[in-house]
Image: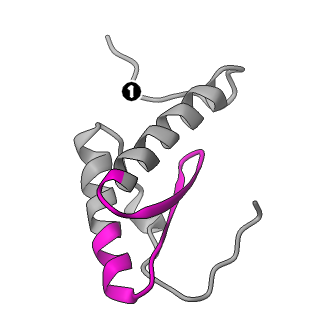
Amino acid sequence: MVDTRLTMGASKSTSVFHQLSQAVKELMGRKGYQVVAYLDDYTIVADDYVTCLQGQHILIRLLRELGFSTAYNKVEGPTQNWFSLV
């Protein structure tokens, strides 16, 4: 049996997930994309719509290759209007 989920209530979970998110951010940076990562949320910062959309596709593919699941109903496309609580 293998755990495939990280329980957010566990004391170490946020630290572990932050490290994983930062690793994904670094991998995307090596591909030339600027990414803001906060826990399980990612924002791609780009100068134009096409670059942002390409980055989104590459990020989703990378996450799948790494074994992360994606809640596609929560994925938002490129926009110039962004709101963050962070």
Please state if 65 lies on the left or on the right of 9 as rendered: left
Helix, strand or loop under label 1: loop
Please state the extent of the stretch shown in magenta in the rendering: 30-55
**Quadrant assignment for the C terminus:** bottom right
Name the quadrant containing residue 59.
bottom left
Residue 2 in percent (x, y) is at 34, 15
Give me the residue at 71% from left, 69% from top: 84
Residue on which disc 1 sits: 4
Residue 33 in percent (x, y) is at 38, 64
Residue 47 in percent (x, y) is at 45, 84
Give me the residue at 38% from left, 88% from top: 49
Residue 44 in percent (x, y) is at 47, 68
Name the quadrant containing residue 60.
bottom left
Residue 33, placed above or below residue 6: below
Label 1 sits on what residue type? Thr
**Quadrant assignment for the N terminus:** top left
Residue 2, placed above or below residue 31: above
